[in-house]
Image: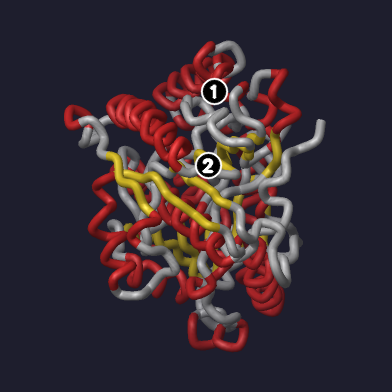
């Protein structure tokens, strides 16, 4: 576990320009990561300027006006996305919008650098390894990332999900393979001195000549006030006592690769093994009806609650009332939902794929092995984890304490002295 840097940071006094497409306070996921990274830099004594989307101006300036952040209005430059692509109603439109916005940033950043040189320019968010960026080489140290998206799911786990999932994964894997030879991406990574990657799998997707510049960092973070106190003592009130069913929670977009199929089939298998458990599925998406029908076919509908998206306060209240997070994602590079669960003292049951298998160890959850195993074996592994937490409540409480401790690795205040020290070959 990494330790926070105590005393005056080696970064103190550095002038850092963040180019952050997603930089929204009081939000979740990628936007929160950008904001928390910036706040962490401010706490470590850096002089920070942020280039971000124009649509975020009211929310950011409102937070500044209320005195809820160390940022000041002059710390921000707002750039609008092209009007024709302002609403990303499809994945392709969103990607084009993002790339166009990044291109607009280059001219603005060049002018900012001309007026005030920066020690570091950091393209932070969105964390896709297949997206180009255009601000490399405009400062003594140019940083990009953390980027992910180079993770692949094992084929035995994709096949049960149907032909659409198989076709999508084939296209995705081809796109990942193209990253090494795409001329725009090769130029992008060549211009940056440091590349933060979320997983080692994403590092291997980089062009071979740029891998020596890579360092691993999940990129997800929480502000200190987002951490709930350890709640091992409150388990009897929240369903963690030996007389109540285990309360499991799944949260995320209802996409095939988020693992809802495996969450539901594992719950069914655990119930067959005598576990007492209930699952809340929070979210929505293309697989909503499919997963509801699956729960019916498995005969577990009465043990599953499907809930649409909740407000952030309501979600946190629901999270804190649960006993564990069940999130068998197939290739998340670094799932914010896992980080939030840990910060709220929730053990995690996941697969040892992508960032999940690095974030979760045996002290704070179960990262079920997948490589070389059939889907049925993986489902059994997830089910056994559910059974263990249901039957061994002292272990559940110990994992709850360990989860809260593990979450400290993702606190945004952990801007270490070497965060902008170039990687060595």
The tally of labels here is 2
Question: Which of the labelled discs sits on residue 117, or is there none?
Answer: 2
Question: How packed is label 2: few (under 14 Cα within 10 Å), some, or many (20 or more)?
Answer: some
Of the pair 86 and 266, the residue shown nearer to us? 86
Which image quadrant for residue 362? bottom right
Q: Are marks 1 and 2 in contact (CB under 8 Å)?
A: no
Can see residue 419?
Answer: yes
Q: Which residue is drawn at 47% across and 38% down?
A: 113
Q: Which residue is drawn at 34% across and 72% down?
A: 313
Which image quadrant for residue 275? bottom right
SS state under label 1: helix
Compared with residue 329, is residue 213 higher up or lower down, i.e. above or below? above
Between disc 1 and disc 2, the foreground one is 2
Question: Which of the labelled discs sits on residue 188, or is there none?
Answer: 1
Of the pair 146 and 171, the residue shown nearer to us? 146
Compared with residue 54, is residue 62 higher up or lower down, i.e. above or below? below
- In the rendering, at what x and y percent does residue 51 appear? 39, 45
Which image quadrant for residue 69? bottom left
Question: Which of the labelled discs sits on residue 387, or is there none?
Answer: none
- In the rendering, at what x and y percent does residue 130 appear? 50, 25
Q: In which quarter of the image is the C terminus?
A: top right
Q: Quadrant of the N terminus?
A: bottom right
SS state under label 2: loop
Of the pair 242 and 176, the residue shown nearer to us? 176
């Amino acid at each position: 576990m990494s330790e926070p840097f105590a005393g005056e940071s080696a970064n103190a006094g550095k002038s850092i320009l963040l180019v952050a497409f997603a930089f929204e306070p009081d939000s979740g996921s990628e936007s929160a990561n950008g904001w928390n990274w910036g706040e962490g830099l401010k706490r470590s004594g850096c002089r920070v300027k942020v280039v971000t989307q124009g649509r975020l101006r009211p929310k950011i300036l409102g937070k500044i006006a209320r005195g809820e952040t160390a940022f000041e209005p002059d710390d921000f430059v707002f750039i609008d996305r092209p009007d024709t692509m302002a609403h990303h109603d499809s994945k392709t439109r969103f990607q084009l919008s993002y790339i166009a916005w990044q291109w607009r940033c280059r001219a603005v950043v060049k002018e900012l650098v001309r007026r005030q040189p920066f020690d570091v320019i950091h393209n932070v968010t969105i964390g896709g390894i297949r997206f180009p960026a255009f601000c490399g080489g405009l400062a003594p140290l140019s940083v990009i990332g953390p980027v992910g998206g180079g993770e692949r799911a094992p084929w035995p786990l994709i096949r049960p999900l149907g032909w659409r999932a198989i076709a999508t994964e084939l296209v995705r894997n081809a796109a990942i393979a193209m990253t090494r030879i795409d001329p725009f991406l090769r130029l992008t990574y060549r211009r940056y001195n440091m590349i933060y990657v979320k997983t080692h799998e994403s590092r291997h997707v980089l062009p071979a000549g740029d891998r020596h510049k890579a360092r691993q960092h999940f990129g997800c973070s929480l502000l200190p006030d987002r951490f709930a106190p350890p709640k091992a003592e409150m388990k009897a009130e929240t369903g963690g006592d030996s007389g109540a069913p285990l309360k499991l929670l799944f949260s995320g977009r209802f996409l095939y690769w988020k693992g809802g199929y495996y969450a539901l089939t594992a719950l069914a298998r655990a119930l067959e093994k005598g576990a007492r458990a209930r699952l809340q599925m929070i979210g929505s998406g293309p697989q909503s009806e499919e997963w509801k029908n699956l729960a019916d076919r498995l005969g577990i509908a009465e043990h599953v609650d499907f809930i649409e998206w909740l407000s952030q306060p309501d979600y946190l209240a629901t999270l804190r009332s649960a006993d564990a997070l069940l999130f068998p994602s197939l290739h998340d590079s670094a799932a914010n939902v896992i980080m939030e669960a840990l910060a709220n003292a929730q053990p995690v049951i996941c697969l040892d794929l992508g960032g999940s298998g690095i974030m979760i160890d045996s002290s704070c959850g179960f990262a079920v092995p997948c490589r070389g195993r059939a889907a049925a074996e993986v489902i059994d592994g997830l089910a056994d984890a559910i059974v263990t937490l249901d039957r061994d409540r002292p272990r559940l409480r110990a994992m709850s304490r360990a989860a809260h401790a593990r979450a400290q690795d993702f606190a945004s205040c952990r801007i270490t002295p070497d965060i902008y020290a170039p990687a060595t070959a």
